[in-house]
Amino acid sequence: MTFRTRFAPSPTGPLHLGHAYSAIVAHDMARAAGGEFLLRMEDTDLQRAKPEWDAAVIEDLSWIGLSWDGPILRQSEHLNGYNKYLETFESMGLLYPCSCSRSDIRAALAAPQEGVAHDVYPGTCKGRPMESRKPGDALRLHLDRALARLSGQSVAFEETGEAHRGTHHLDPQRALQEIGDVVLCRKGEEIIAYFLASALDDVHQGITHVVRGEDLFDFTQLQVLLLTLLDLPVPVYHHHRLIRDEAGKRLAKRDDARAISKYRAEGATPQDIRRMVGLV
Ligand code: GLU
């Protein structure tokens, strides 16, 4: 199998040094292995993703000296393709409609659930059958049923990144406490959750090694669970260190001060960028 990595930015703002590091690591790993490096725009958020940011990603990566193989996959052009996987989950009886707003969820989580990770859904709509779905409802994964369905089957992935190197197995009890019934299809529009779209496209694009920042490590077991439920192959994951600011905070899209385009405008070279992220 061809060793294949990818860079999968959301074109919702300027690429900063953290993105540059991620793209270079994924690119260099693929090239060193004689493999392929793919580019995917994760632009399912139709409100925030903009063509000008998409163009800026291409310009920045090209300027850094990265080249990618094959056409760029834009998720916004494949939104219908994701629905068939939602239908599969539905036919397995693993979905239920949910009309809770974020504030309903926060209120339900308040006192009794203290100590539980903030975004674990308290299950308000859990008993609802799919037939009760109303326009605007989200669809949630019934995690207990999903786990029951997999009983006996291992949900595992191989991690090659330094901080978590080794084989990781899903712990059902922890999954119930830490993941809960996630939204797979967002409310309002028929838009798939980004962690599902991303995992599906990794399979679709034949990615053998998912190279990305440490901040996404916690999503991995959920993504692997979803792929296993769908009987899809699970890639190897490689979570790399994050590029942090002087205060130790990871860079975010709003950190325009560290935007690659800004360094470029100030006369930096691609080699300077590699040096700034500790790659030379
Ligand atoms: N689109 C995600 C982001 O820009 C990355 C997802 C991934 O690499 O798996 O943060």
Image (cartoon, rainbow, N blue to C red):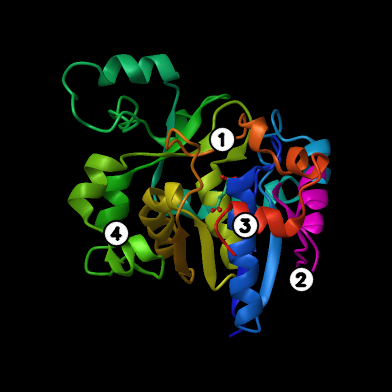
Disc 2 from disc 1: Cα separation: 27 Å
Disc 4 from disc 1: Cα separation: 38 Å
Q: Which amino acid, mark 2?
A: Asp
On screen, residue 75 above or below 133: below
Comparing labels 4 and 3, the label whose residue is closer to the camera: 3
Q: Position of residue 12 (x, y in %)?
A: 69, 35
Q: Along the horizontal axis of the image, is 87 left or right of 272? A: left
Mark 2, other Cα within 10 Å: few <14 / some 14–19 / many ≥20: few
Q: Where is residue 177 in the image (x, y as percent from the top left)?
A: 22, 40
Of mark 3 and mark 1, the one earlier in the sequence is 1
Q: Answer whether residue 84 is magenta in the image.
A: no
Q: Answer whether residue 72 is magenta in the image.
A: yes
Q: Could you tell me which secondary element the residue under label 1 belongs to?
A: loop
Q: What stretch is highlighted in magenta?
A: 56-75
Of mark 2 and mark 4, the one earlier in the sequence is 2
Disc 2 from disc 4: Cα separation: 38 Å
On screen, residue 243 above or below 210: above
Disc 2 from disc 3: Cα separation: 25 Å
Mark 3, other Cα within 10 Å: few <14 / some 14–19 / many ≥20: few
Pointer 2 residue: 69
Q: Which amino acid, mark 3?
A: Arg
Pointer 3 residue: 275
Task: Check whether the beta carbons of the residues at disc 2 and disc 1 lie within 8 A of each other.
Answer: no
Of mark 2 and mark 3, the one earlier in the sequence is 2
Mark 4, other Cα within 10 Å: few <14 / some 14–19 / many ≥20: few
Q: Position of residue 172 (x, y in %)?
A: 22, 54
Please tell me the numbered disc located at residue 252: 1
**Could you tell me which residue is drawn at 31 percent across and 24 percent down?**
124
Of mark 4 and mark 1, the one earlier in the sequence is 4
Q: Can residue 39 be seen in this view?
A: yes
Task: Check whether the beta carbons of the residues at disc 3 and disc 1 lie within 8 A of each other.
Answer: no
